[in-house]
Amino acid sequence: MAQGHTIPLLYLARILRQHDVPVTVFTTPANSPSVRATLHDAGISIIELPFPADIDGIPQGVENTDKLPSMSLIFQFANATKLMQPQFEKALQDIKPVGCIISDAFLGWTQDIAAKLGIPRIGFYGMSIFATTLYFILGQERPHALTTSPDEPFSIPNFPKLSLTRNDFDPPFNELDPKGPRVDFMMEQNIAMAKSYSVIINSFYELEPSYTEYWNRCIGPKAWCLGPFAAAKPQVLLANESAKPNWMLWLDKKLQNGDSVLYVAFGTQAEVSQEQLLEIADGLEKSKANFLWVIRSKRLEISEGYEEKVKDRGMIVKEWVDQMEILRHKSVKGFLSHCGWNSVTEAICNGVPILAMPFMAEQHLNARLVSEEVGVGLRIMPSNGSVRGFVKAEEVEKRVKELMEGTKGEGVRKKMKEVGEAACGAIREGGSSWETLEQVIADVSNYHKISFF
Ligand code: UDP
């Protein structure tokens, strides 16, 4: 129950319907309106299970991580979901037959029910197979064991070209001996995953082939790359101009004027400090680029007079936007992104090159994938010589100019176009993701020795 996990799973549900698979989506009352809106025309059943009440620290009505008063409550929140187990089990027994359960990996408890009812569980981490594999290698093979500082580079066995630092991994995993609730929580989910039938990846084979193969050969359970899921999002066609949100009208105007726009957004969870926000604002102003900036956090405030200063070329939006529609817009030529995996895949679907500025979770690894492994983006770096730290305005200005006007920008734009075309090819009939999904359907049908589909 986090936007970055729900959104791709809903797109996947649509893809499954395209392959004639009957789908039921489980959600909770507060999440239900957005789930229903996304799936309204998809012919998918939706079941609401009540979210547990009276959980210490979780205000009544908060049923999604993006509504949590602080991300420090994430484990109370995730653990609270375990209390939904009996209702989930009962609701499952009322749907017959169930071919398989596709479950977010952070709901590890669904594996217990799957095992009890003899239904295969397919997990979903919501990450690239690159980042998922590297987290497993770090935990199991400890290639960082001899490093003496979190910024000392180390190499990864079997991937000789790759050089990482401990700071590419989110705390506490950047420590040599990580401990605490986050480690315990991940262990629990990973054990459930190890017992699962397989894992679904929101990626396509051609994007991360060596990591997919390594995972299947050395880690497991079997990974199936079925994405990018965002390609299944139907385009929003608005009947007239008055139905368009302000930001869309603004982008249309920029397109008419022949201006290129940088889209700036850091997802739903990254906790950007006020100081860092002001520095980014300063860098964007100095870059002279046209930009559309979505600031989701209510606690962050841009300095007074800023919007007036940049008014002809900068627009700041504080409400929920349709990010895929923004990335689809012909005026958008660059994406300053935190590199949440959905944002990366959405940029790929639309061929928009990325300026990577990671903050948390596996975003630093995604930034490496984007800028070093695949070459579809440039990287913004902190000034302290580490991959993690404060980014100065000058760096933002320089990299924005490079992406939007420079030859490096041209290079990654060209590469992004190729990769975007490969992504579209993967999900088309006969493409790698399409074929893999057909295989999943056949495997699951076979598992039960009867064909539901
Ligand atoms: N998103 C959106 N509108 C917003 C903010 C976010 O559509 O105003 C979507 C975005 O398109 C993506 C998801 O929310 O599908 C965010 O996922 P991502 O993995 O990029 O980042 P996270 O929020 O998990 O850090």
Image (cartoon, grey):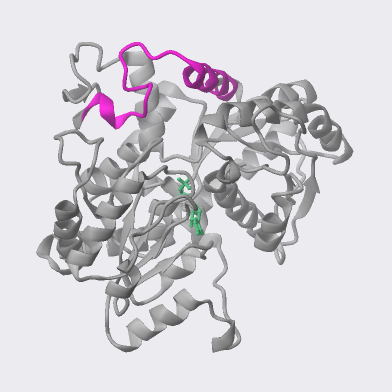
Among the 4 quarters of the image, the one containing residue 263: bottom left
Residue 201 in view, yes or no: yes
Q: In the image, 319: left or right of 147?
A: right
Residue 76, percent from left and from top: 62, 27
**Residue 167 belongs to magenta span:** yes
Extreme-front residue of the structure: 304
Residue 40, percent from left and from top: 72, 64
**Above or below, comparing residue 239 to residue 1 in the picture:** below
- Residue segment shown in magenta: 164-193
Q: In the image, 165: left or right of 321?
A: left
Q: In the image, 99: left or right of 412?
A: right
Q: In the image, 184: left or right of 257?
A: right
**Above or below, comparing residue 445 to residue 237 in the picture:** above
Q: Which residue is drawn at 32% across and 14% down?
A: 141
**Above or below, comparing residue 347 to residue 201 in the picture:** below
Residue 109, percent from left and from top: 67, 24
Q: Which residue is drawn at 34% across and 77% down?
A: 331
Extreme-right residue of the structure: 94
| Nearer the observer, 213 or 181 | 181
Residue 415 in view, yes or no: no
Residue 434, percent from left and from top: 52, 53
Q: Residue at x 53, y 37 (%)?
A: 70
**Above or below, comparing residue 101 to residue 186 in the picture:** below
Among the 4 quarters of the image, the one containing residue 120: top right
